[in-house]
Image (spheres, grey):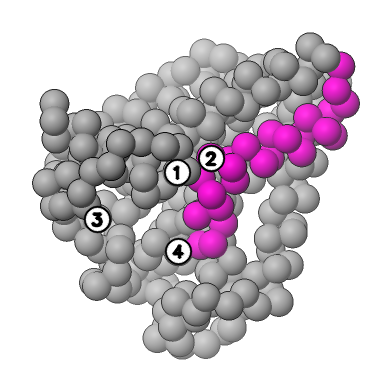
Amino acid sequence: MKKLWNSFKVAFAMFSRIPVPRADWTRENMQYMFCFFPVIGTVIGGLEVLIWRFLGHFGYGSFFSAMVMVMIPVLVTGGIHIDGLLDTSDAMSSWREKDKRLEILKDSHAGAFAIIVCCANFLVFAGSFSEISRNRKAVFLAALVFVLSRTLSGTGVLTLPKANQKGTVAEFSRNAQEKTVLTVLYIYLALLLAVMLLIDPLMGACCYAAAVLVFFNYRRMALKYFGGTTGDLSGFFLCTCEVTCAFVLAFVSHLQCH
């Protein structure tokens, strides 16, 4: 139990701004860290539903509600995954060779393409949530997406080759109890599929399928253009997965209502 508790603390300290007791980042404490990565998504999803209900109760408009809901993941995570979105966007937009792309990922400066992609990401997110906020089932599915994206992201970290063997992702993967953690993540994926289909078969299936397609596109991109995954690429996937699923939910929920 101590190992699990320490892995829980390391996961929350690394991937969120939620205060947790301190735990040393040792190999032992990182063994089951990715089992708890999706739990952060559960916290985000729970807050999304609570805030949606609160704002709806007091009659706030759909756009204001969408703006607040879009900011919740940023506040909980500190924007750690958005950094990966920006860096990857700059690297992909450079059209340079693999080594140069990997070098751009490490650059702390944000280029023009990164800013454009970031603005587009938040615009699509806000517009999608504005539509989703009108449909209770779509809101619950959108909340589950934050768990689904982190489950798939953790799966990618453990199963994909590493572009940088000295990077953070490579270290996390080496320290993980891979077989056990992957089994837990696959169970999460199966449970998420069942729950999403139970909430709404059409929207749930479309949303889950969208997440899986984004994952395989991320896998193709990582292998083809970077030789494997990195922390930034994992963040890029997580952001694109969440915004794509939100867009799909907005689109399908609108069709269902009409």
Quadrant placement of the N terminus: top left
- Which residue is identified by label 3? 172
Gap in angstroms between the C-alphas marked 3 and 4: 14 Å
| Residue for badge 1 | 16
Label ID, residue 232 = 4
Q: Residues within 10 Å of mark 2 (few under 14, many from 20)?
A: some
The amino acid beneath tag 2 is Val
Does 95 sit above or below residue 69? below
Front: mark 2 or 3: 2
Taking the magenta stretch, the answer to whether it contains residue 76 is yes
Earlier along the polypeptide chain: callout 4 or callout 1? Answer: 1
Residue visible at 78% across and 30% down?
Answer: 65
Q: Name the quarter where the C terminus is drawn.
A: top right
Principal secondary structure, stretch drawn in magenta: helix
Residue 109 relative to residue 12: left or right: right
- State the extent of the magenta-drawn residues as a range: 59-84
Of 178 and 248, nearer the camera is 178
Q: Are marks 2 and 1 in contact (CB under 8 Å)?
A: yes
Check disc 4 and give the amino acid type: Asp
Q: Are marks 2 and 4 in contact (CB under 8 Å)?
A: no
Q: Which mark is residue 76?
A: 2
Give how far apart the Cα atoms at labels 2 and 4 are.
18 Å
Q: Is residue 73 a member of the stretch shown in magenta?
A: yes
Tell me which amino acid carries mark 3.
Phe
Q: Residue at x 51, y 62 (%)?
A: 84
Q: Which residue: 51% across, 45% down?
A: 77
On screen, residue 32 above or below 57: below
The image quadrant that residue 5 belongs to is top left
